[in-house]
Amino acid sequence: MILLITLTMTGVAGYLKIKLTEEVESVSAGLIACLGLFLSLLFAPLLIKLLLLAILLVFPKTSLV
């Protein structure tokens, strides 16, 4: 349950970082997004962590955006 909460917060903060025009709010949203990603990786099950590691090893220079 904690994983879903942190991923939701991270998604909202990432969206706000893209859409906000004020610099202070954008930086704050970026920091919250980074913190949320760190917490979601911390609370994620081992299988999800291994899956993310495998994806990064298979596609090291793929641009997602």
Image (tube, rainbow, N blue to C red):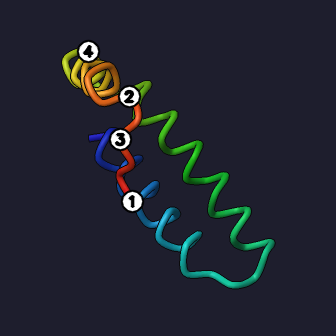
Q: Is mark 2 on a helix, strand or loop?
A: loop
Q: Residues within 10 Å of mark 3 (few under 14, many from 20)?
A: few
Above or below: residue 10 compared with residue 20: above
Task: Give the mark nearest the N terminus, 3 or 4.
Answer: 4
Which residue is identified by label 4?
Answer: 46
Q: Identity of the amino acid at label 3? A: Thr
Q: What residue type is labelled 4?
A: Leu
Residue 20, relative to residue 7: is it above or below? below
Q: Residue at x 39, y 48 (%)?
A: 63
State the CA–CA distance, disc 2 to disc 1: 14 Å
Tell me whether the residue at label 2 lies in contact with that at label 3, contact meaning CB atoms closer than 8 angstroms. Answer: yes
* Image quarter in which the C terminus is found: bottom left
Pointer 2 residue: 60
Q: Which amino acid does label 1 sit on?
A: Val
| Picture quadrant of residue 49 | top left
Q: Nearer the viewer, mark 4 or mark 2?
A: 2
Label 1 and label 4: CA atoms lie apart by: 26 Å
Q: Residues within 10 Å of mark 2 (few under 14, many from 20)?
A: few
What residue is disc 3 on? 62
Count of numbered tags: 4
Between the residue at mark 2 and the residue at mark 3, the CA separation in whole angstroms equals: 6 Å
Is 63 on the left or on the right of 27, as rendered? left
Q: Which residue is drawn at 46% across and 54% down?
A: 10
Q: In which image quadrant can residue 28 be found? A: bottom right
Q: Which sits in the foreground, 22 or 36?
A: 22
Cα–Cα span, label 4 and label 2? 21 Å
In space, the residues marked 3 and 1 are separated at their CA atoms by 9 Å
